[in-house]
Image: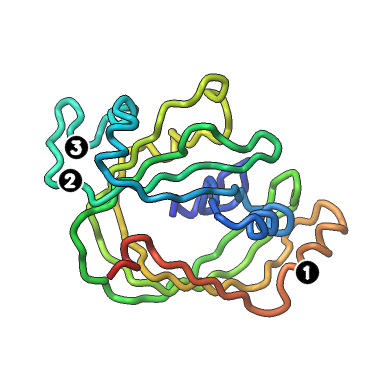
Amino acid sequence: MAGLVWNPPTSCAWAARVFVNNREARDHGVRHVGLPSRLGAFSLVPAAAAGAAAPEQRSGGNWWLPGAPGGKQSAAAPAGVLELRNTDTGRGRGLSTPVCLVELPAAQRALGPRITLSLPSFSGGTPEVPGLLRYACDLTTHVGLVAPLRVTVPPAARGEEESPEQLGAVLGGRPLLCIEFAQMEMRVEEPEALVLANTSQAGAASGWATARTTASVTAAWGSRA
């Protein structure tokens, strides 16, 4: 979670981007809910292969990481590297280089306590959904404090340096607190239109859900336990 703050003009009070690997889910988020959804491809590669494939990327941008000049060396090699790619081809929203590389820890850890959080959320303010929608989200998940994972943002490809899809400013910052959310279950209420740009948006909002919509997500290495 990037924090409960408004993120204009990309909408969505808690995320700069929402990456999904299902085209129907992407279309639904963009057209009906006003989310900054993108089609993503997730792949797990061995740590050695990722390092050999992009040695110049591993030191770029993230000055606070272990192993950076003046920093401490990493204590253990990662089990693998999760590569995220933006494969969205609509309206120039894709990228030719990976969005980021996330080094996954080798050690297994016990799940933290399971809690339920009630989160207010907003979406809209996009060309597809110009008004503002509000909906309640109940999140049930195991939580625990963990060490920050090493996230590397590859250099932008030529011609994509100024693309709004470049998320280095978001992903390359220094973490203040790292919390694991494992085995998440989200229950989302039907959205309420706070600001309607036109009557067609009201119809889209009312057709978004007939009752309560439930989505389950399992955290990457929490699911391995």
Q: Residue 55 appears at what percent x and percent y? A: 29, 28
User: Badge 1: how crowded within 10 Å, few (<14), some, or many (20+)?
Assistant: few
Residue drawn at 69 percent across, 59 percent down: 28
User: Badge 2: how crowded within 10 Å, few (<14), some, or many (20+)?
Assistant: few
Amino acid type for the residue under numbered disc 3: Pro
Amino acid type for the residue under numbered disc 1: Gly
Mark 1 and mark 2 lie on one chain; the one further toward the N terminus is: 2
Q: Is residue 157 above or below residue 82?
A: above
Instruction: Quote the CA–CA distance across marks 1 and 3.
Output: 48 Å
Q: Is residue 96 above or below residue 20?
A: above
Q: Which mark is residue 207?
A: 1
Q: Residue 128 appears at what percent x and percent y? A: 75, 48
Q: Are marks 1 and 3 in contact (CB under 8 Å)?
A: no
Mark 2 and mark 3 lie on one chain; the one further toward the N terminus is: 3
**SS label for mark 3:** loop
Amino acid type for the residue under numbered disc 2: Ala
Q: Which mark is residue 77?
A: 2
Q: Nearer the viewer, residue 80 or 66?
A: 80
Q: Which mark is residue 171?
A: none
Residue drawn at 27 percent across, 65 percent down: 144
Q: Residue 192 appears at what percent x and percent y? A: 70, 67
The quarter in which the C terminus is drawn is bottom left
Report the side of 107 relative to 220 (left or right).
left
Residue drawn at 68 percent across, 79 percent down: 211
**SS label for mark 2:** loop
Mark 1 and mark 3 lie on one chain; the one further toward the N terminus is: 3
Report the side of 65 relative to 204 (left or right).
left
Instruction: Quote the CA–CA distance across marks 2 and 3.
Output: 12 Å
- The quarter of the displayed image where residue 1 is located: bottom left
Mark whose residue sits in front, 1 or 2: 2
Residue with the mark numbered 3: 66
